[in-house]
Image (tube, helix red, strand yellow):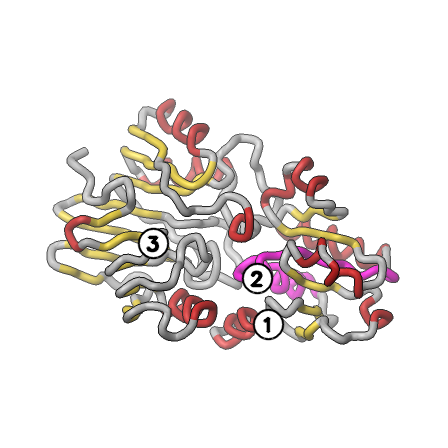
Amino acid sequence: MATPILDRNLHLRAIDAYIDPSVPRERAIITHGHADHARSGHGAVLATPDTIAIMQTRYGADCAGRFEPLDFGVPLRIDDVTITLFPAGHILGSAQVLIEQGGQRVVVTGDYKRLADRTSQPYELVACDLLVTEATFGLPVFQHPHPRVEIGRLLQSVVDQPDRSHLVGCYALGKAQRVIALLRDAGYEAPIYLHGAMPALCALYEERGVALGDLRPALDVPKAELAGAIVIAPPSAIRDRWSRRFPDPVVCQASGWMSVKQRARQALVELPLVISDHCDWGELQQTISETGAETVWVTHGREDGLVHWCRSQGLAAEPLDIQGFADEGSEGEAA
């Protein structure tokens, strides 16, 4: 293909805008609200209304010089470049970025998942010439089970061990709300207790139309009342002194990484729940094939395996080494 309209730092030269930059830029296009993609300090931010609301909730109303909300599917023309955002299915407001210029179509997926759930707008496939895709779970070993199966395991454990509380480690943005919604959709109507890091973002989701049911703060609840209860907390909290207030807790964690038994053991997780907000290996392959892209750039994840597969399919493919996208640590827990 001709020289791409986007460089390998996700810099759109024609309008001097960066996608998910890791340092403050004068112009930034933000795919979603996780902190390894959305940072404060940019001069101007283009994003979906939900992502802007998330950024302002997390960082403050003035976390960027100005915000320009762009709804899904609405083309925005800047000089000879057209930007359109499409749902990525990762978390509330998450977007793929379609860039069109001079007959080229480039899609930057950001983080994405194809399995629909009611806490995010469902993924939409976008045809393109160049696809820039994440590869968080870009190895054949990663084949995610259906989340209903994992939630069923959690609920069965609650039934089997009614004297123990269940502490579920979830990242505060996206994963927590998804797990709560999965529990509600499975018929669990009891109060769900929250660590103090959770209520603000849960309230934002509810304000934006995602019903989560009866949520209560876990702080200062008598220990006896928490027997048999489900508590949602950041993964770091379920392994520190905070967790000692709960009766004989079953330590759980919801993440795609819980399919790696060694990670679960190292994290002292008794009940690993393989619930991911990213595509697994098969879904990555499916997406690449269905977009019709002839060129694929692979970033933030297991790049080499997916690049090798793309080349075996006759596609031009290469890894991108973009600094700042998390694999593990605080943002990696969102997987």
Tell me if label 2 and label 1 are in contact, CB under 8 Å.
Answer: no
Q: Earlier in the sequence, mark 1 or mark 3?
A: 3
User: Magenta span covers which residues?
Assistant: 162-187
Residue labelled with disc 2? 172
| Residue 97 percent coordinates (x, y) | 31, 53
Relative to 331, residue 162 above or below: below
Q: How far apart are the alpha carbons under marks 2 and 3?
A: 23 Å
Q: Which residue is mark 1?
A: 199
Q: Residue 193, position in %: x, y?
A: 70, 69
Q: Earlier in the sequence, mark 2 or mark 1?
A: 2
Q: Residues within 10 Å of mark 3 (few under 14, many from 20)?
A: some
The N terminus - image quarter = top left
Secondary element at tag 3: loop
Q: Residue at x 40, y 65 (%)?
A: 51
Q: Amino acid at mark 3?
A: Val
Please tell me whether residue 166 belongs to the stretch shown in magenta: yes
Residue at the spot 37% in from the left edge and 48% down from the top edge: 109
| Mark pair 2, 1: CA separation | 9 Å
The amino acid beneath tag 2 is Ala
Looking at the image, residue 160 sits to the left or right of residue 151; the answer is right
- N-terminal of the pair, mark 2 or mark 3, is 3
Residue occupied by mark 3: 23
Marks 2, 3: nearer the viewer: 3
